[in-house]
């Protein structure tokens, strides 16, 4: 298998995983944090893995630049979830005034 074939296969697997698994879970997570819920340990682990995987996707986008908008929107979605999750975490702590 050539390097190009490997990259195409990797891209296809990452896109299928994103559409079938990551995006639905990410949307559910966003809805929960928008509703004031805190991020669970498994949600935090998922976001860490997703951010690490985004680095791989960024490298592939240099070879196959067809979907930069998807990458940008996805990373923005992760950032929004992390920000809201942090705010919810802070709001859940007792006020020490």
Image (spheres, grey):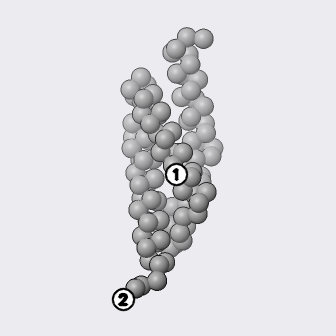
Residue 27 visible in the shown view = no
Quick check: 25 left or right of 93? Answer: right
Indicate the secondary structure of the residue bearing disc 1: helix
Question: What residue is drawn where x is 56% and y is 35%?
Answer: 15
Q: Is residue 5 left or right of residue 64?
A: right
Q: Residue 80 location, x and y as percent? A: 42, 58
> Which badge, 2 or 1, is on the more N-terminal residue?
1
Residue 69 spot, x, y in % from top left? 39, 40
Disc ID at residue 78: none
The residue positioned 43% from the left and 73% from the top of the image is 90
Q: Position of residue 64 (x, y in %)?
A: 43, 25
Q: Looking at the image, which residue sits at the far bottom?
A: 97
Residue 14 appears in the rendering: yes
Q: Are marks 2 and 1 in contact (CB under 8 Å)?
A: no
Q: Compared to 51, does 91 lie above or below? A: below
Residue 41 figure quarter: bottom right
Q: Secondary structure at mark 2?
A: loop
Q: CA distance from mark 2 to mark 1?
A: 33 Å
- Disc assigned to residue 47: 1
Residue lying farthest to the left in this orientation: 97
- Mark 2 or mark 1, which is nearer to you? 2
Examine the rendered structure and indicate whether residue 86 appears above or below residue 61.
below
Instruction: Say which of 96 and 63 sits in front.
Output: 96
Q: Position of residue 20 (x, y in %)?
A: 63, 44
Quadrant containing the C terminus is: bottom left
- Which residue corresponds to the image point at 44% horizontal and 36% vertical from the top-left? 55
Crowd rating for badge 2 (residues with CA inside 10 Å; few <14, some 14–19, many 20+)? few
Residue 97: mark: 2
């Amino acid at each position: 298998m050539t390097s190009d074939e490997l990259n195409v296969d990797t891209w296809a697997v990452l896109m299928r995983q994103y559409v079938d698994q990551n995006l639905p879970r990410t949307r559910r997570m966003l809805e929960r944090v928008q509703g004031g819920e805190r991020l669970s340990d498994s949600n935090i682990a998922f976001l860490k893995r997703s951010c690490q995987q985004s680095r791989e996707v960024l490298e592939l986008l240099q070879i196959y630049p067809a979907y930069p908008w998807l990458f940008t929107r996805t990373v923005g979605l992760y950032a929004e979830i992390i920000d809201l999750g942090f705010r919810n975490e802070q709001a859940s702590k007792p006020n020490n005034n």
